[in-house]
Amino acid sequence: MKESDIRNPNTHERYLQLVREDALAFFGDSSRLEETACPACGTRKFRAEFVKFGFTYGSCESCRTLYVNPRPKMGPLTEFYVNSPSSRFWVEEFFKPVAEARREKMFKPRAQHVAQLLPGQNRGKIGDIGAGYGLFLEELRRFWPDADFFAIEPSPEMAAICRGKGLGVAEVMIEDLQGADGTFAVLTAFELLEHLHTPETMIRKAFSLLRPGGYFLATTLSGEGFDIQVLWEKSRSVFPPHHLNFMNPDSLAGLCRRAGFEIEAAETPGVLDWQIIEGCSQRQEAPVGRFWETVARHGSAEAKQELQAWITKHRFSSHMRVVARKPLS
Ligand SMILES: [Zn+2]
């Protein structure tokens, strides 16, 4: 997979500019922000690291999660997602043109992974939290034709598209989904946790919605990922108020355990870290440090491949995944 398959660089640049403007327009007034404890471990040992678009990012001294603090209050954050020009642009200009490419490069492999990982769940009730256009569920349905699929998607526009695909739809935020406790075999949440005001609330709700022995599978950004660590505040993945939480495999696993889950895997299957750094170096977008400049210019293709394989294997990719199970009793 190449970065350009899933992101158009020019559109991405324009999008980030809009986010910068929205951040100021929606949250320039500090009464719309509030102090928060660490979203992963709940302690308040916060060390400020840098400011971006007016938001302060810092590290938890206990679990090493990188997070925005103070952060937007829940109400204004929801309003931002519904009404901001950057959110609209993301759907219309950024996602739609690459949606089919993303189906091939991201959603199909995701579905294949879930089908292989959890073969015993193929007749159960499957929910995707923040399902968007329903691409993941559609792809999973090819593997599991007998399962029962639910898109949990609060946006009316996207919920309608999911309905059109014959998926069950709950047009609510997962926190507001009533009467379904103990019914789901699998709940997935792809690239969602980094956006949430309170990830713990969502994870605890997922726990109660699952039946005993059911699985929660989530992907998100790791703040200890290679490209994020090298680029830090210059990383394009670090953009508030969209990306508020950068947990790491340990802190995400810890959060799931506190909600009652058993951890089956906490890993970083990402493969784009090196390409992101090499691209930044070639385009001279941001300094990547002398050593990585040297590797980008003079390293062999094999060296670069092995580096990425090492990053992925040792849980230092910025694309992270957790697989958690609700205990049987
Ligand atoms: Zn923490």
Image: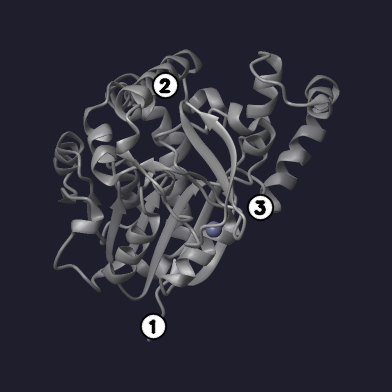
Quadrant of the rendering where the C terminus is positioned: bottom left
Front-lying residue, 126 or 237: 237
**In the rendered view, does 37 fall on the left or right side of 250?**
left
**In the rendered view, does 93 fall on the left or right side of 314?**
left
Name the secondary structure under disc 2: helix
In space, the residues marked 2 and 1 are separated at their CA atoms by: 46 Å
What is the three-letter code of the residue carrying label 2?
Answer: Arg
Tell me which residue sits at (60%, 50%) in the image: 268
Q: Residue furthest bottom?
A: 329
In space, the residues marked 1 and 3 are separated at their CA atoms by: 28 Å
In space, the residues marked 3 and 2 are separated at their CA atoms by: 30 Å
Q: Which mark is residue 20?
A: 2
**What residue is disc 3 on?**
315
Of labels 2 and 1, earlier in sequence is 2
Q: To which quarter of the image does residue 34 belong?
A: top left
Residue 49 spot, x, y in % from top left: 61, 39
Tell me which residue sits at (18%, 59%) in the image: 177
Residue 217 spot, x, y in % from top left: 43, 59
- The picture quadrant for ligand 1 comes to bottom right
